[in-house]
Image (cartoon, rainbow, N blue to C red):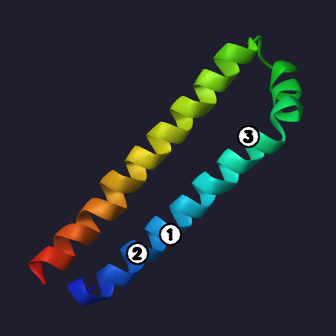
Amino acid sequence: MHLDELKPLLLWCLGIDYVLLIVWFAAFRLAHDAIYRLHTRWFRLSVESFDAINYAGMAAFKIGALLFFATPLLALWLAG
């Protein structure tokens, strides 16, 4: 794969990751109680720990998207 073909791929991957992040946040915000009830069937979780786990997961997902897609994309744009 040539480097010029890699730029659109990285941009698409970054866009898809951010769409997934927005969907995750929207589902967490709009259906918090239902998702919490679903997960407490399997795990013992307080509401505070459930919220902390979700926000930490969202943060890790966002950092991963920035690290694996945005940073190489920026480097390719600056180099090209």
Residue at mark 3 to residue at mark 2: CA–CA distance: 26 Å
Query: Taking the image as drawn, is residue 2 in sight?
Result: no
Q: Which residue is mark 1?
A: 15
* Residue farthest left in this picture: 79
Binning the other alpha carbons within 10 Å of mark 3 as few (below 14), some (14 to 19) or many (20 upward) gives some
Q: Residue 75: x and y, percent?
A: 17, 69
Identify the mark at residue 72; answer none if there is no mark.
none
Circles 2 and 1: CB atoms closer than 8 Å: yes
Quadrant where the C terminus is found in the figure: bottom left
Binning the other alpha carbons within 10 Å of mark 2 as few (below 14), some (14 to 19) or many (20 upward) gives some
* Residue in the picture at 48% in, 45% down: 61
* Residue in the picture at 35% in, 63% down: 69
Binning the other alpha carbons within 10 Å of mark 1 as few (below 14), some (14 to 19) or many (20 upward) gives some
Q: Which residue is mark 2?
A: 11
- The kind of residue tagged 3 is Phe
Image: 35 above or below 46: below
Q: Secondary structure at mark 3?
A: helix
Image: 66 above or below 11: above
Whether residue 44 sits left or right of residue 72 in the image: it is: right
Q: Secondary structure at mark 2?
A: helix
Quadrant where the N terminus is found in the figure: bottom left
- The kind of residue tagged 2 is Leu
* Residue farthest front in this picture: 29
Q: Secondary structure at mark 1?
A: helix
Query: Taking the image as drawn, is residue 34 in sight?
Result: yes
Q: Which residue is mark 3?
A: 28
* Residue in the picture at 23% in, 69% down: 74
